Image (cartoon, coloured by chain):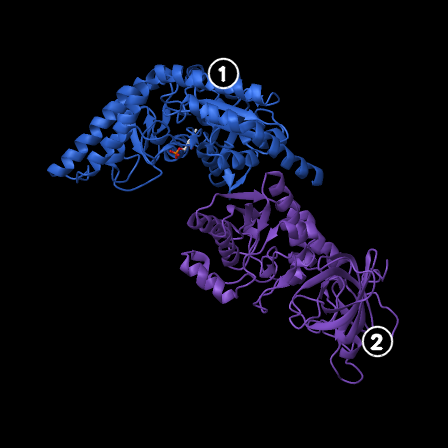
Chain colours: A purple, B blue
Amino acid sequence: MKVLAAMSGGVDSAVAAARAVEAGHDVTGVHLALARNPQTYRTGARGCCTLEDSRDARRAADVIGIPFYVWDLADRFHADVVEDFVAEYAAGRTPNPCLRCNEKIKFAAVLDRAVALGFDAVVTGHHARLGPDGLLRRSVDTAKDQSYVLAVLTREQLDRSIFPLGDSTKAEVRAEAARRGLAVADKPDSHDICFIADGDTRRFLAERLGEAPGDIVDAQTGAVVGTHRGAYAYTVGQRRGLSLGVPAPDGRPRYVLSITPKTNTVTVGPAEALEVSTVYAERPVWTGGPTPTGPVECLVQLRAHGQVVPATVRLDGGSFRADLHQPVRGVAAGQAIVAYRPDPGGDIVLGSATISGTATPLRSPVAAGAASPGA
Amino acid sequence: MNYLDHAATTPMLDEALEAYVATAREVGNPSSLHAAGRLARRRVEESRERVAAALGARPSEVVFTGGGTESDNLAVKGIFWARRAADPGRARVVASAIEHHAVLDPVEWLVRHEGASASWLPVDGAGRLTPETLAAVLDEHAAEVALISVMWANNEVGTVQPIAELAEVAAAYGIPFHTDAVQAVGQVPVDFAASGVSALTVTGHKLGGPIGVGALLLSRDVTATPVLHGGGQERDVRSGTLDAPGIVAFAVAVEAAVKTQQEYAARVGALRDDLVARVRQAVPEAIYNGDPDNRLPGNAHFSFPGCEGDALLLLLDAQGIACSTGSACSAGVAQPSHVLLAMGADDDRARSSLRFSLGHTSTAEDVDALIAALPGAVERARRAGAIRSARA
Ligand SMILES: Cc1ncc(COP(=O)(O)O)c(C=O)c1O
């Protein structure tokens, strides 16, 4: 096959490209220039968008012996990922920009362009498995597994994707990179969000959304227990950074339960109040088989590297509902809910959707953000 | 591989390569006083005389440098500094809007860091600059101008400027005139003295010599403040141990390129005309950029509406055809060419352009290969371009 390897400049995508060559594919490497001004993105080893990363990717392509180009996707990335990130926070939700980048950039803008130019598939260094059966599975390296941020991909997207690393651990990938003479072998993993240069998400948001002081309200008493500088900067389940002036009556720590952008209010309460028994979600995709018409028993994961719990999932047109068999704390709207097949391995992705709201065991649905179930 | 990117760099001539290797086997620093040094010095000075003779300059006017970029920097910054030092009122640089970055960026650097001001001379839709345009700017600013820089021939679209006429205008105002002739030497007749310019940039690797060696021809009545300070090897205006093998090979290549210029232009020009005619036949909507007449013989430059140049480049590269989008890259990302924008093209037309440049090793087979691959590549690139504009 004629394939396009997306090369970030990191060790994973370099080894993925090398393996694609070894598998007999005709491989062309591309580095995606995502930053409008590369200097403002994370420097050195931490990001995936700096000039240094671009040079590392080119050097890896040289070593592997494949053609290499840089594709400028800065405008698309800004519109579809960065602006979406800010808008989601402004709406009281907690976005996952890596997931959005996969959905809109790597497996959309890049894939579409690649196909138009005559390529059959895109190769990436994601840690996930995609076998001949077309099923997306967790990586054998569960700590590095990225199936959660890939579950958003549709059947058509998966059919044109190749993930050569899913059967290897990160340590094996690094060792292989060293064996292949790839200088990125010991480059540290990227962390955090590539477009937030200093890692300070709150300040990044404040610069774009402005300071917007408002009340922090106790869910039980309804009393104002503190002020915040912008409701958008909070995430459901967050405990740190609340600086509440009024202690809780029982003296126990309080957590963010919900964010209401309309009134610019952050509601806090005890840990138990974070418990959620039902998750509502929207924009579902289902790639683990035919779209189910009735309830399906699944294992669901509600955030990247989060815990996995059994649940009954129902799909109804554009909406997705998961009734959790055990309550989960801290479920934020905007994150993905990913359903896995409930076999012992639990590693086959069935489907995914974007969380829009939750319900607690005792109370009626509380919109965890602006959207409410079925809206 | 079919190499259609001679304007980026062209293969070394055999005789230049042989001269390089032979000289590189000899030991000797041209500045040393012993026999080995004297031999190296002799090689350098003979080369200086050969370059001077080939380009219509005096040997003392040849300053060897590390190539075109260095020569341009030395001319622009060096003459600017010297002129301003002599007269603080002279802090303006006049340059064409289509200069290579090796001129453009030094001028912008002077503006940002040295309090210079710049006048960018506009060009017409074919990339031509008229003497009247220059005269108009000088009428207004003559007393402030430190130097003028206008390239002899443009590296992207191949347009050749009326350098002697422009230099005459400059001379009437007594202002030093520099020209970047990197793309011109060996392609069109270039004579330093006859052209009337005061400084001229030439580089080895565009005419069959090695990369990393070139010269600034600097008229003896123009002073330039050094950019590189050190041993003062070249007239005290350029320091650094002289690269005897590089200089020898450079001189051989300059001499050969100038000697064969006429027959080269006839042969390569005919090949280029064939390429242009067949590209237009294969892709009728292609726009031929630049001046159809006053043009480098090896240059063909097109815009392919609806395509992106970098997509075309990738597709042609995959078929073994090497060409260029012609414009500078920043971090590997193709920017819309400032040359095409200055010629009045919009962003899309600028981004859709591709340069095919022929040279001394080009054959009809290279043109055949391009014509065989191009229509399919254009169709694919157009499909990819349609996605982008639909989503954008
Ligand atoms: C017009 C022009 N000026 C200057 C240069 C730079 O010359 P060099 O590569 O020798 O530094 C080039 C070559 O890219 C050129 O085409």
Q: Does residue A305 appear left or right of residue B356 in this picture?
A: right
Spatial separation of the CA atoms under disc 2 and disc 1: 84 Å
Instruction: Tell which of B45 and B141 is nearer to you.
Output: B45
Can residue B154 be seen here? The reply is no
- Disc 2 chain ID: A
Q: In this view, does B65 lie above or below A112?
A: above
Image coords of residue B88 (percent x, y): 44, 32
- Disc 1 chain ID: B
Instruction: Tell which of A306 and B125 is nearer to you.
Output: A306
* Type of the residue with mark 2: Pro
- Read off the residue under disc 2: A361
Image coords of residue B34 (percent x, y): 11, 39
Q: Is residue B277 above or below residue A43?
A: above
Image coords of residue A167 (percent x, y): 55, 63
Question: Residue lying farthest bottom?
Answer: A250
Q: Is mark 1 on a helix, strand or loop?
A: helix
Question: Residue lying farthest right?
Answer: A364
* Type of the residue with mark 1: Pro
Q: Is residue A197 above or below residue A68?
A: below
- Read off the residue under disc 1: B131
Where ligand 1 lies, by image quadrant? top left
Question: Residue lying farthest left?
Answer: B35
